[in-house]
Amino acid sequence: MAMTEAASLTVGELEANYHLYCKAMKMLIMEERTSQEIQRTVCWSRLETLHNCLPSMYKAPDYLFTLLRREHMQKKGPK
């Protein structure tokens, strides 16, 4: 997707796809990608945009990352 296409997304379009961005982040965590790798993804930037536009409705991506990573680690169990 070209940068102009990404810039033309509305908040409503971002909100409509919120669950997909969370699902993408969850998949990246399951692949055991690093925080730095995930921060460079489209899903991170879209979640960040939603948080910046509507902070009372959407948590920051780093907060979501922490929650999802903790959940993944609990499911994974001790090594």
Image (cartoon, rainbow, N blue to C red):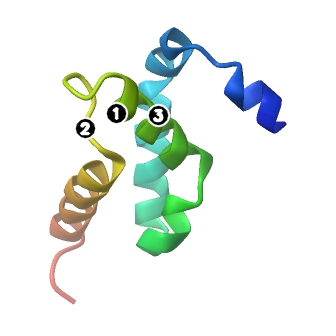
Q: Which residue is mark 1?
A: 51
The label number, if any, that marks residue 61 in the structure image: none
Q: CA distance from mark 2 to mark 1?
A: 6 Å
The label number, if any, that marks residue 49 in the structure image: 3
Q: Residue furthest front?
A: 52
x then y, percent, for residue 33: 49, 72
Q: CA distance from mark 3 to mark 1?
A: 5 Å
Q: Quadrant of the C terminus?
A: bottom left
Q: Earlier in the sequence, mark 2 or mark 1?
A: 1
Q: Is 64 on the left-hand or right-hand side of 12?
A: left
SS under mark 2: loop
- Residue sitting at x 51%, y 21%: 14
**Vertical position of residue 78 compared to residue 39: above or below:** below
Tell whether label 1 touches label 2 (CB within 8 Å).
yes
Question: Is residue 33 among what the camera can see?
Answer: no
Tell whether label 1 touches label 3 (CB within 8 Å).
yes
- Residue sitting at x 58%, y 13%: 10
Amino acid beneath label 1: His
The label number, if any, that marks residue 59 in the structure image: 2
Amino acid beneath label 3: Thr
Locate residue 15: give its quadrant: top left
SS under mark 1: helix
Q: Nearer the viewer, residue 17 or 36?
A: 36
Amino acid beneath label 2: Lys
Q: Is 33 on the left-hand or right-hand side of 76?
A: right
x then y, percent, for residue 31: 49, 68
**Vertical position of residue 7 compared to residue 9: above or below:** below
x then y, percent, for residue 61: 35, 48
